[in-house]
Image (cartoon, rainbow, N blue to C red):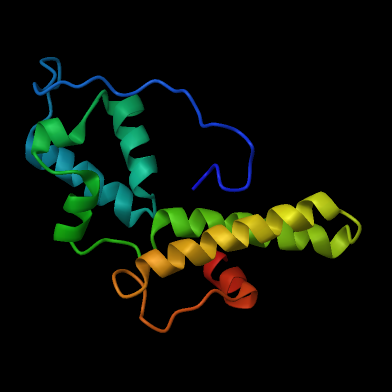
Amino acid sequence: MARLHTHKRGKSRSHKPTNSNAAKWVDYSEDEIIGFVEQFAKQGKTEAEIGLLLRDQYGLASVKLLTGKTISQILKAKNLTPKYPSDLIALLKKAVNLMEHLKTNHGDKSNRIKLSHVESKIKRLVKYYRGKQLPAKWKYDPETAALIVK
């Protein structure tokens, strides 16, 4: 999806090494790790933010290797999944910020184009999530996007 509106051929990046063994230095039990995930979710953190916090503050490289479940699966089991998917929320925030910028800067044509690109990504994601994590009749609307983000 990232290459649709650019002329680039993709991004080269490092990947997480494949390892099927849990780290030996971890002193936390499975219940403690699930408790950390639950605590951060109640604070309003997304799955990605929870993973970063566990990695950086607690030294947990992979929740899946230690618990057998991903962070999303743990949140689903505890009924703590957010109402909207985190990737959709990130795009909605970006669209709202671009709309606010365009209210004060009417002549910014490049941002107007970028806003249309972000809105098309939102519409494609909504089409993907419709019926699964979004209601069947849910449509993107800039006013409702501003209300959802704030």
Nearer to me, 75 or 86? 86
Residue 99 in percent (x, y) is at 73, 63
Tell me where residue 98 appears, x and y as whole percent: 72, 57
89 on left or right of 81: right
Give the residue displayed 36% in from the left and 79% down from the top. 135
The structure residue drawn at horizontal position 53% and vertical position 44%, both measured from the top left corner, is: 2
The residue sitting at 14% across, 19% down in the picture is 23
Compared with 66, 123 (above or below) is below
- Can the viewer see residue 92? no
Q: Residue furthest bottom?
A: 137
**x and y percentages locating residue 95 in the rendered image:** 64, 59
- Quadrant location of residue 20? top left
* Residue 117 locus on image (x, y percent): 64, 56
- Quadrant housing residue 149: bottom right
Is 108 on the left or on the right of 33, as rendered? right
Left/right placement of residue 99 relative to residue 31 reads right
Which residue is situated farthest in the top direction here?
25
